[in-house]
Amino acid sequence: MQDNRTEGGRRNWIPALFQQAAQKIAADAVKQFLTEGVRVVGLGSGPMAAAIIREISKLPYKENLQCIATSTQIKLEAEYGGLKIVGEDLVAEVGVVFDGADQIDKKSNMIKGGGGALLKEKILHSAAKNVIITAESTKYVESFNRSVPIEVHPFARYLVAKKLEELGGRPKLRMLDEGYVYVTENGNFILDTLFTSILDVRKKEVELKSIAGVLEVGLFTKHANVYYKANQDGSFEKIY
């Protein structure tokens, strides 16, 4: 029998069950929120993004949809599914955005930016009439216990790092496996910053964004309309 535990004993996702949950969530989310009245769709990131895109590509009226992608990877997925990609001139008209999250706390705040697209994702969240989040059950936590991605202008890297340390953070410049600095599609750097605790997420978001040189912060405090939780047995839950 296959063992699906990591070295630390934590059970990993069984691929077939993950796909079952992802497909069920995609079908439900698209049916409920992508009605024929929606014309502009935001496509965020996350492991279930491909399932959402496949479901959208099945719609008989997909030719009428205009999609805004937050990353090149998602753009390619959408184009492969026959979806029309448009530019930022239609951001203000986004009817719904489908996105993922790195962590979701008990108050429905999120940490995002693990894939590096936090700036565009937060813009879409701000613009969208409906925000739909899909994430594995392991990403739902009582309180955040992972680093917060902070996108910074390269010119401000050292200043921002110093300010973050003064605020009790431990910033670490994101690097690629090859040893090069990770550069976002916007031409910026990311400081993955660990805080011992964040008592007031909204206050911390505002505090971090007030630092000169910070372009965006991976704390997302605008609550989604619905959170889909993919369970490890292949089922899913909806949290409003």
Image (spheres, rainbow, N blue to C red):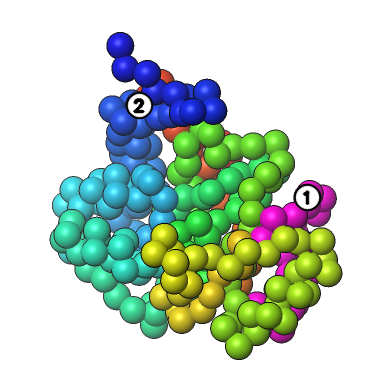
The crowding category of the residue bearing disc 1, from other C-alpha atoms within 10 Å (few below 14, some 14 to 19, many at least 20), is few
Q: Residue at x 64, y 80 (%)?
A: 157
Residue matched to label 2: 14
Whether residue 61 is situated above or below residue 135 in the rendered picture: below
Q: Position of residue 210 (x, y in %)?
A: 75, 77
Q: Position of residue 22 (x, y in %)?
A: 35, 37
Three-letter code, disc 1: Thr
Q: Residue at x 31, y 31 (%)?
A: 15
Three-letter code, disc 2: Ile
In this rendering, position of residue 193 left or right of residue 67: right
Q: Position of residue 35 (x, y in %)?
A: 34, 52
- Helix, strand or loop at label 1? It is loop
Q: Which residues are magenta?
A: 193-214
Observer-nearest residue: 236 or 8?
A: 8
Q: Position of residue 73 (x, y in %)?
A: 30, 63
* Dot label at residue 196: 1
* Dot label at residue 101: none
Residues at marks 1 and 2, CA–CA distance in whole angstroms: 32 Å
Q: Residue at x 23, y 48 (%)?
A: 54
Residue 25 visible somewhere in the drawing: yes
In this rendering, position of residue 95 left or right of residue 167: left
Mark earlier in primary sequence (1, 2) = 2
Hey, which quadrant is residue 154 in on the image? Answer: bottom right
Q: Residue furthest front?
A: 179
Look at the image and say whether residue 208 sits in the magenta stretch.
yes
- Helix, strand or loop at label 2? It is loop
